[in-house]
Amino acid sequence: MSAFRKRGSFLVVLYYVGSFHVLFGYNVSREEQRDLSLNRKWTIQNSNGSLSLPAEVPGCVHSALLKQGFIKDLYFRFNDVAYRWIALDNWTYTTTFSSSTELRAKQRVQLVFEGVDTVASISLNGVVVGKTDNMFRRYDFSVGQLLREGENIVKVSLLSPVVYASERSQAHSSYSVPPDCPPPVQKGECHVNFIRKAQSSFSWDWGPSFPTLGLWKGVHLEAFDVLRLIHLSTVPVYNSSLSQWVVKVEVLVDAVEETKVQVNLSLMELSTEQTFMVVFPSGQSKNTLSLHVNTSNQVKLWWPSGHGEQHSYHLSVRGTMLEGTAILRTDTQVYFRTVELVQEPIAGSPGLSFYFRVNKKPIFLKGSNWIPAHALQDLVSPADVRNLLQSSVSANMNALRVWGGGVYEQDMFYSLCDEMGIMIWQDFMFACAMYPTEPDFIETVREEVVQQVRRLKSHPSVIVWSGNNENEAALATNWFGIPVAQQPRYHRDYVTLYVDNIRAIVQKEDGSRPFLVSSPTNGVESQQEGWVAHDPYDLHYGDTHYYSYSHDCWDWTALPRTRFASEYGFQSWPSFSTLQKVSVSEDWSYGSNFSSHRQHHQTGNQQMLQQAGLHYHLPASADPLKRYRDTLYITQVMQAQCVKVQTEFYRRSKSDVIEGKGHTMGALYWQLNDIWQGPSWSSIEFGGKWKMLHYFAKDFFSPVLPVGFEDQGSLVVYAVSDLSHDLHLRTVVSVYEWSSLDPVCTVASGLVLVEGGSAEVIHKQPITALLAGCGRGSCTRLTCLLTFHLEDVNSQQGPINHLFLSSPKNTQRMLRPNITAEVQQDEMGGYTVTLQSSAVAAFVWLDVGDVPGRFGTNGFLMVTRNRTVTFNPWGPTSTQQLAQALTVTSLRDVY
């Protein structure tokens, strides 16, 4: 996504001699603990001392000001601009603590910051112990000699990220590093590429500018006499020549002096145990121990969602010193899986394939792109993360791309993805920009990459690393208007950063999964062209980002038959109940200042209505509030149908190679979630409410799916299957008049073999012949529509799909459906809504306002007189509350 154009957590128990460490989300405890958490109350102060207030750690200045009542809701109306002053000031965090005699007596004491946002000088008792310049790094400083009896004072002096980025840019005087600033429509800050923090924090085309400052992760002291564990990772690797799994157990420690430790590794469920004698030299060292899994046991594999279970095994790590003292006791989970990115010739096509093979099985990636869930990371709750990920799986997704303009997500995110079977495409945090390559910038990036790869490589959910978002494309197609004579310099900088440094580190630290330099990219073809392809959007290679807002989104012939679609999408507005929380009545019109302010994509509001107007009547109620709410609805209808058409095109192209293009093996639409309440490409609103698109995704990502479309006057129906086994399927097509709920006719094809993991044409018929032979031949494209589904010999397979034979705005005899609804509670404590309709109704939308939860289906085509829809609440509610909140809208109700 470009800002400039649109086209189970591990359990670790450590027995050290006096050392303690909380390691990237691991839960740590042990005997004779000598640690001190500083996640307590701090105070913060601005540069001139006019503001001084309590602050929580983890946290940031913005959230502290919010909690103490100095500012209001950051997302309310125009507060993103009103609160710019916060990030333009310098701030100091201060806390005090008492250190025990026992703690001060330890051989070493480290002051550890898990995450500092971003540029800071850190002092203890008036002595500067270190500086930070990277939000994505963990920092620790030796402070044993500075501790004193009684009160100790820690100060973290944070520089304005906006001012710092500007000064770094000015200091880079030899040549510019574009872009300088985001487009004015984003109302953002400049030079974000000069500071290692979330790039979207200075604004993006879907979010506000809140350049945060603070201690966004934990702070603590670690005291030890012998050694401390800095990091533990486990990466299973399959040795095909020996037909054996080997678990690479990597232990990173910091030892006071050379220490010999006997380390025992055990996978009891797999009858596997080995003991190693390890010599840890003084200082930090990394040791990799290879645990060979007993071949007499069959290893149960980790599979992506929809392809199998997510099995894991308990790994025990025990360490004792030579005299028998227990010094290390660690327990963690190990998942076994292999992953390959297959780029090889395709019969009948130039170029190369581009698909992922997990456990030797080709997998079509179905999913979306993940952005930061809040502008203030400390306000992202575990419940928020779980809800978004569960919503992904509930919509039949098996993959998410963690986009490179945000943050490397918290540990719980990846652990939940492990548990749920969600594959992660992990970008490094570089997006839509050129970047400097001064030694200090490269040095901090190198440490960032080392730490993040070590933190994340134990997770089976992470299947690929990607160096950046869209920077190869930006360079190749010259987004920033760099003169031709100067382009080689930027090319060299690109290779220096992403190839010579990031790629080299990743390949050294983790050889178990593929690495891509960019997205989109031509993959190995880009590499052969010097890492920047002439055309990174070449459909014969790699992945593609594709956006087109002016072209009719129903016209599938204009879509790119790519190898892998990693970004595509359309905007919509969130629901009225979501916007109400951050607006007032004067904002509730599509042409209001609020509606314009909230839109960060140039002409985005107009583009939505133009696209919607191609196929739907735009709302025209005389009631301004109804017209506004109907307009929000019609943007969601447009978005859902547009992304449906495109996703179904990609899914049916998995087995096709047409004019050398096709063999599509991934569809990740832009974007899953929202960072605030505003227009965006998301399918889930800020707060977790599903848009119509997300309900559509549940169907168009179904494991078995009928895809129907018109090609040169004929109805063509594909059967798409993600299953491992073959199916014998027929298509059942029903023809309905818009004015009647009784089908005019129903026709069925013969059974056709659909191989597992394929997309096959199983029905083709001229539409004129279908309509002429149906009933009395009274149907026309304007008066009738089609529904279709798949069946085997026993039952329906997959969802019911539909095809409009003309734009809904041109249909004849579309009647108001006069839908009524009755809410009831079922025996299991859930709720149902029973609908009655007097006519065929398109895009039937059920909305219960602020009541948290989701419906079993929504935005659907209703071709029956009665339909019952379930509602799954996410919190306490009642039949009365739901009935009072429920509104039902269909397409015919908005004009």
Image (cartoon, grey):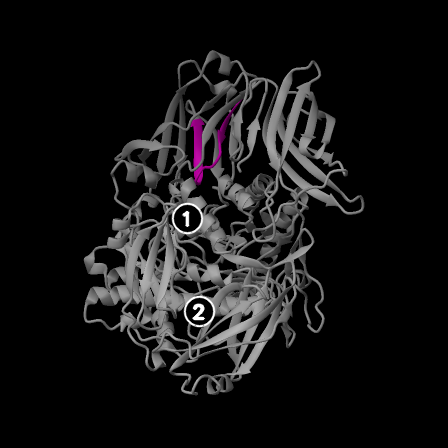
Q: Residue furthest top?
A: 101
Residue type at the position of mark 1: Ala
Query: Quick one: SS at disc 1?
Result: loop
Q: Is residue 509 visible?
A: yes
Say whether residue 725 is magenta.
no
Q: Label for residue 532? A: none
Q: Is residue 121 above or below residue 837?
A: above
Q: Is residue 169 visible?
A: no
Q: Residue furthest right?
A: 241
Depth check, front residue: 583 or 136: 583
Query: Quick one: SS at disc 2?
Result: helix
Q: Position of residue 479 (x, y in %)?
A: 49, 65
Q: Position of residue 57 (x, y in %)?
A: 39, 32
In the image, 487: left or right of 593?
A: right
Q: Is residue 75 above or below residue 628?
A: above
Residue at 38%, 83% (x, y): give it: 782
Q: Position of residue 526 (x, y in %)?
A: 64, 62
Which quarter of the picture shows residue 794?
A: bottom right
- Find disc 1 in the rendering and name its residue: 373
- Find disc 2 in the rendering and name its residue: 642
Over which residues does the magenta segment extend? Answer: 109-123
Q: Residues within 10 Å of mark 2 (few under 14, many from 20)?
A: many
Q: Residues within 10 Å of mark 1 (few under 14, many from 20)?
A: many
Q: Is residue 858 above or below residue 687?
A: below
By secondary structure, the bulk of the magenta-drawn segment is best described as strand
Residue at 31%, 52% (x, y): give it: 824
Q: How far apart are labels 2 and 1 at the CA level?
A: 24 Å
Say whether residue 110 is magenta.
yes
